[in-house]
Amino acid sequence: AGELSFDFYLEVASAAVPGGNKEAFANLMKARGSTLLENLLQSLHAHLSPMPLRVALPLKCTFVHFGSLVEYPYACALVASREGAAGSYSPGAQALLLNCQDVRALRLTEKGDVLGEVSTGEVNEAKKEDEIELGSISVVENCRGCSLLLSPGAHVIAGLRDLRLSEPLPAGMCLDGRLIAQVGQPVLYTVLVYSIYDSFKAVRTVNDVSPP
């Protein structure tokens, strides 16, 4: 988190392209609209140019750009809507399972009725792109042995193990399972809880935090 604003493709990826010098790089970035200070651009080039960027593309490749966490489930659903996409997606459950094992997700209505469900191993029921709504998709990624209840709205659920919810997860909530390893210490498993509307950028006061 910080106060700097930069574009990964404009400044970072360009800095790793072989050739040129830091002064020329800074001038080029300014001409292309970069808002970073010249000394920062030169420092970026000095640190990344020794590690030349190399790119390999598969025969079939899709890039979906998203600028905020709330757009991530929407972007994943767009990819899933295309032919040959991986994962298990159900339009009724409005949920996408990616790289999961033994996971079942139920989408509930506001009254608690089951609207739809999706489980690992099911066929990806692709939905037309123009039928996918921002803020309505839940993404479950790299989870194992989980039974999930989802309230209406978007969620990001990742890295969970053996979690069985008895109450629906509120709209906008994210559960992020992490393994934390320290030298000489046992590996710890922790779950980060945050909102899909969080920006993870520094703010000056509590009042500057955007409400969900």
Image (tube, rainbow, N blue to C red):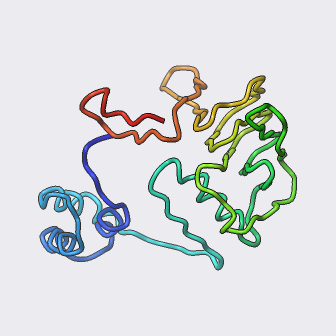
Of 205 and 179, the residue lying toward us: 205
Q: Which quadrant of the view contains residue 85? A: bottom right
Residue 30 rendering spot, x and y as whole percentages = 17, 70
Q: In which quarter of the image is the N terminus?
A: top left
Front-lying residue, 109 or 137: 109
Residue lying farthest to the bottom in this orientation:
59
Q: Which residue lies furthest to the right in this view?
A: 122
Q: Residue at x 29, y 61 (%)?
A: 48
Indicate the position of residue 205 as horizontal and vertical percent values. Answer: 26, 28
Number of residue marks: 0
Quick check: 14 left or right of 212? Answer: left
Work out whether residue 78 or residue 50 is closer to the camera in this orientation and state it.
78
Residue 110, visible in the rendered structure: yes
Q: Tell me if I can see residue 176 in this picture.
A: no
Question: Which residue is depicted at the point 87% across and 54% down?
Answer: 122
Identity of the residue drawn at 31% across and 70% down = 14
208 vs 63: above or below: above
Q: Residue 104 sits in which quadrant?
A: top right
Instruction: State left or right for residue 19 relative to residue 84.
Output: left
- Residue 151 higher or lower than 80, as above or below: above
Front in this rendered view, residue 67 or 103: 67
In the image, taking residue 101 as reference, residue 20 lies left or right, namely: left
Pinpoint residue 101: horizontal percent, then vertical percent. 80, 43
Seen in the picture, residue 50 relative to 186 is either above or below; the reply is below
- Residue 161: give x, y in percent of width and height: 72, 31
